[in-house]
Amino acid sequence: MNQAQETPQSINYTVLFIICMASSLVPFTGSALNLALPYINKSLSLDVVTSGWIPTAYILSTAIFQVPFARIADMIGRKKIFLTGVMTFTIFSLLSGFAQSGLTLIIYRFFAGFGSAMMFGTSIAILTASMPSAKRGQVLGINTAVVYASLATGPLLGGMLTQYFNWHSIFLVSAGIGLVVFIGALITIKEEWKEEQKTTFDTVGAILYATGLLALIYGFTELPKWESVVLIIIGSLLLTGFAFYEQRHTYPVFNIHLFLSNRVFKLSSISALINYSATSAIAFMLSLYLQYVRGLTPQDAGFILISQSVVQSVVSIVSGRLSDRFSPTLLATSGMGIIAAGLAGLCFLHENTSYIYLVGLLMILGLGFGTFPSPNTNIIMSSVEKKDYSMASATTGTMRLTGQAFSMGLAIMAISIYVGNIQLSPDAHTQLMSSMRLTFSICSGLCLVGVYMSSVRGR
């Protein structure tokens, strides 16, 4: 057994630090960008649907390429793919900072998603392989806490950067952090964690997977157009064909038997998909609400939204530690239930809602968000063998990004129904409120389904 396969006896804090820094890049950029979108819309003269494609293009490419890159990482080494991903993300973040049109910004964000796909497909796998199994929940909790801390600082710093400099500065800061992560990973991560030596890449399976997922996610983002229904059907058929094809392939791009024979892995992955489908549009909708309906500056809106992420950061550390000692299924299910309650409360927001009420709901949501992910990820990574760490890591990331794309598609659909394809302004605040209530009502119902899925996986 080589060193890469040995079970670590103590926490590798240098690797933990680098992976945590890499994990902070995406949530920081995304949450900061939510606050900057109204300024980007005005600067580049974008309508509301085009504006929604700035985060959606990134989510699409990240979701589509995570599983193929995880497979490649098993073949040539997780460190190589991770480093390539960090550099790709850094380069296109830098280019995004100099974008002069909505189209170029969307294109740069799409290619930045390539880099994120490489990072997401390997980061949790590297973290899991580098740490003792008895401490897995703890380190996953720390990593999750860093993610939520980035979500907390994103709106605050993003609002300040946008207000006192411009929206371009958000991408420049992200590129700077990416460069630091790349240098740190190059120095501190020693192993490659190459799991398979003599295999071939499943090109046909990768194409079926990518086109099927692209059609499915793109269809969600284009709802309620009739073309979107056709795309969703095509995507579903392609993914069904992909599943049958993978069962018969010697070296599949995705080990479909993980879903067919591993009940815990399957239901935990579906729980993650439902969770992110129900929650990812919250920050997007509330940033529009606080700025267009309540008239707040990006900085002031950031101060309100930070309350949720602060609670998430603290709770996720605790829930990660608890998942090593108590039932992670119970913890994750409780977190999903708390999120459902918080979303139900958001349905009652109106033009003059007390900020104390809103902050209270955000703190409840933060409690739920902090309780769910670490135990759920611990369950997923603990349910597979070492050789499947990359695939499990990529599956977790794909569920997250697919859920985010569905959530954003749901939000854009609601806005399209009530507001239409126009440039948002405070004059449309009544229609925006209606679209927000519809979004939060559907998301709350999704969470109730997630509570059931999460609770039955251990039976």
Image (tube, grey):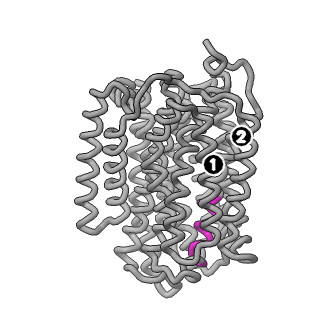
The answer to whether residue 429 is above or below residue 303 is: below
Rendered residue at 63%/48% (across/down): 86
Quarter of the image for residue 399 reads: top left
Q: Is residue 199 visible?
A: yes
Q: Estimate the x, y position of residue 15 in percent, counting from the top left.
A: 72, 34
Residue 312 seen by the camera: no
Snapshot quadrant of residue 193 = top right
> Which residues, given as a range, are shown in magenta?
29-39
In this picture, is 11 found above or below 165?
Answer: above
Given the image, on which type of amino acid does mark 2 rest?
Ala
- In 3D space, how far apart are the residues under numbered discs 2 and 1 (Cα atoms)? 9 Å
* Quadrant of the snapshot with the N terminus: top right
Count neighbours of disc 1 (C-alpha within 10 A) and say few if under 14, some if 14 to 19, many if 20 or more: many
Q: Main secondary structure of the magenta part?
A: helix
Q: Where residue 292 sits: x, y (%)?
A: 56, 79
How far across and down, in percent of the image, does residue 117 sit?
Answer: 52, 47
Q: Is residue 36 magenta?
A: yes
Tag 2 near tag 1, CB within 8 Å: yes
Left or right: 277, with 88 as reference point: left
